[in-house]
Each structure stands twice: as C-alpha cells, then as structure tokens.
Image (tube, rainbow, N blue to C red):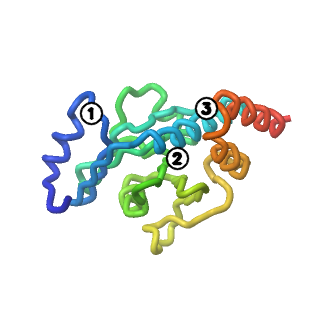
Amino acid sequence: MRDVPWETYLSLVEIEDRHTRIAYDQGVMEIMSPKMAHERVSCLLGRMIETWTEVRDIDVVSVASTTFKQDEVSKGFEADESYYIQNADQVTHLEEVDLTLHPGPDLVVEIDITNSSMRKFGIYASLQVAEVWRWEGEGLRLFTRTEQRNELFGYEEVTESHVLPAFPIADAVRLIGQRLQRGETQLIREFRSLAEAASE
C-alpha cells in the first residue's frame, strides 16, 4: 500500500494479538500474514542460532518479531527473527528499545518463500541493522552492513557471518532442507552435536 500516513502505521502496530508483520518505508506499507511453511523455516533457523550461541557461550538477546520503528526517518519493520549479539549488553536490561538511544538489532532473519524481503533493505540500513540473513528457496544468503552505498542500500553479500563468526551455514541449510523428512528435535540435536564439535 502506498501513501499510507505514518500515524496509520503507528496505530496498526499497536493492535494487540494480531498475527501479521508490518513493514513501513516513508508511506509504503506492507502487511504480511506468515504461513506454516514460512514459520517452520523461521523457527528452525532461530533454534539453530539460539543453540549456537548457547554452545559457544555467546550472550544474546532474542527479540523475534519485535516492532522496530523510528519517527525521524518514518521507517519501521518486524523481522521474522532478530537478535542483539554484539550489542546484547546494551539492551539486556530493557523491556523496550528506543532507536534514538539504542542500536538496532545486530542480526535480522527474513524467510522469503512467497514474498521478497529485498525491498526492506533500505529500512534495515536506516535503522542500523548490522547483518541480514535471507532464506530464499532452499538456501541462505548473508548480507552485512558496509560504509559504501550500493544497490542493496549499504549491504554487501558475504559467505560467512560477521555477527556469528564460524556459524555453520552449510550445515544449517542442509538440516533445514530435511525438515519434511525428519523431526525438528532430531535436527536440532544433530546441529547441537556439530556446534559442540566446532567448540572443541
């Protein structure tokens, strides 16, 4: 939807018990209602990130699909998953984040099954998201913030995470690809074993 007033967006994100995710970029608003196929990948990848940080003893603040918004730039988003990692100590004590005072998430995860998240990169850049992981089809692409403005609004594609160094991307993709043949608990147990082996 285009030409949506900022006030309308603010009123929508305040609705309790809604099951949608809303992105807003200077008058352009997108409302999404995630399907089961989308949520299965999102939750599984999220569990892997949380397992990795636990095994590697990395402090993390998981903020899932929290609404991040900033009046000054008229932008806001709700990711599929989001985390504070490098900046975890700055928000651990908070119940709400004020982006005029605190940093944006260090890591945002977007699951692209029916819609593309590429149009949101300008929002992420403005709200200081350090890294974006984008699941598309049956693979995972990683984008990290760069000082140079390019076609991805200040992000460049990388092969290894800067936020979670050594995270086994290929193993995560392989295990997520088996989600329709194996149980989630079994997949996470295997991922944990890989994470523990990498920590030795």
User: Which residue is under mark 2?
Assistant: 107
The residues tagged by marks 1 and 3 sit, at their Cα atoms, a distance apart of 30 Å
- Against 148, residue 5 (above or below) is above
Residue at 36 percent of width and 42 percent of height: 101
Amino acid type shown at disc 1:
Arg
Tag 2 secondary structure = strand
**Is the residue under label 1 in contact with that under label 2 (CB below 8 Å)?**
no
Mark 2 → mark 1, Cα distance in angstroms? 24 Å
Identify the mark at residue 18; answer none if there is no mark: 1
Please state the horizontal and vertical placement of residue 113, each as a whole percent of the image. 46, 53
Q: Quadrant of the N terminus?
A: bottom left
Report the amino acid beneath label 3. Answer: Asp
Instruction: Please report whichever mark, 1 or 3, sits nearer to the chain's N-terminal start.
Output: 1
| Viewer-nearest residue: 200 or 2 | 2
Q: Mark 3 points at which residue?
A: 59
Q: Residue furthest front?
A: 181
31 on left or right of 46: left
Kindly indicate the quadrant of the structure image that contains residue 78.
top left
Residue 37 in sight from this viewpoint: yes
Front residue (pair 136, 6): 136
In the image, is 69 to the left or to the right of 167?
left
One can see residue 100 in this view: no
Amino acid type assigned to the residue bearing label 2 in the image:
Leu
Q: Going 66% across and 27% down the picture, which residue do you hit? A: 185
Measured as percent of width and height from the top left, residue 23 is found at 31, 51
| Marks 3 and 2 in Cβ contact (< 8 Å) | no
Residue drawn at (58%, 65%) of the image: 157
Q: In this view, does 161 lie above or below 21?
A: below
Q: Where is residue 110 in the image (x, y as percent from the top left)?
A: 47, 50
